[in-house]
Amino acid sequence: MDTTKKTIILFSGDFDKVMAAFIIANGAAAMGDDVTIFATFWGLNIFRRAEKVQSAAKKSTLQSMFGKMMPKGTGKLGLSKMNFAGMGAPMMKKVMKGAGAMSLEDLVDSAREQGVKFIACTLSMDILGFTEEEMIDGLEYAGVASYLSEADEANVNLFI
């Protein structure tokens, strides 16, 4: 076990939960820890490109519907509680900006600059019909076995 290694399973696509994951990841990385974020299911949405991308992959009708209904990127995430018909996240962002807190986009950039490893779950991508072309640059792609190997070495493993 490596006491300087942290792993986070990012299952949620809720703005507030994703913020928490990236605040923790940045804090651990700032302390010199190796951090891995394994994004699966709804957590994959934060790593989707905001712009429309043409993919050569053949998708089922259901997979195409998932892609259209689910948020693309950090700017489209809603709150887990008190979403107020979509107004909760913009209100929270305004309060955070007024308090001088980093935006989610800045936290993602900071984590990347500090060497946090981002892994996209390939099984979840297959199920939801997401392709690598639809995802942001700088991701690694792996299955659960690869993540579990990393988690076995870590002294902290969080599920968010």
Image: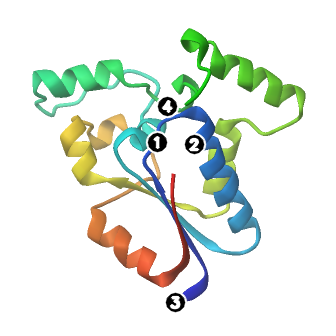
Counting residues from the N terminus, which is met first, the one under dot 2 or under dot 1?
Answer: 1
Q: Residue at x 12, y 21 (%)?
A: 61
- Determine whether label 2 and label 4 are within 8 Å by CB: no
Which residue is tagged 3?
Answer: 1
- Determine whether label 3 and label 4 are within 8 Å by CB: no
Helix, strand or loop at disc 1?
A: loop
Helix, strand or loop at disc 3?
A: loop
> What type is the residue that disc 2 sits on?
Val
Helix, strand or loop at disc 2?
A: helix
Q: Is residue 69 placed above or below 48 in the rendered structure?
A: above
Quadrant of the rendered image containing residue 80: top right
- Determine whether label 1 and label 3 are within 8 Å by CB: no
Q: Is residue 8 placed above or below 97 in the rendered structure?
A: below
> What type is the residue that disc 3 sits on?
Met
Separation of disc 1 and disc 3 at Cα? 27 Å
Q: Which mark is residue 73?
A: 4
Separation of disc 3 and disc 4 at Cα? 33 Å
Which residue is tagged 1?
Answer: 12
- Determine whether label 4 and label 1 are within 8 Å by CB: no
- Determine whether label 2 and label 1 are within 8 Å by CB: yes
As drawn, the residue found furthest toward the bottom would be 1
Helix, strand or loop at disc 4?
A: loop
Counting residues from the N terminus, which is met first, the one under dot 4 or under dot 1?
Answer: 1
Quadrant of the rendered image containing residue 88: top right
Q: Position of residue 151 (x, y in %)?
A: 44, 74
Crowd tier of the residue under label 1, counting other residues whose Cα lies within 10 Å: few below 14, some 14–19, many 20 or above? many
Quadrant of the rendered image containing residue 74: top right
Tell me: 116 left or right of 152: right
Q: Position of residue 117 (x, y in %)?
A: 51, 62
Which residue is tagged 2?
Answer: 18
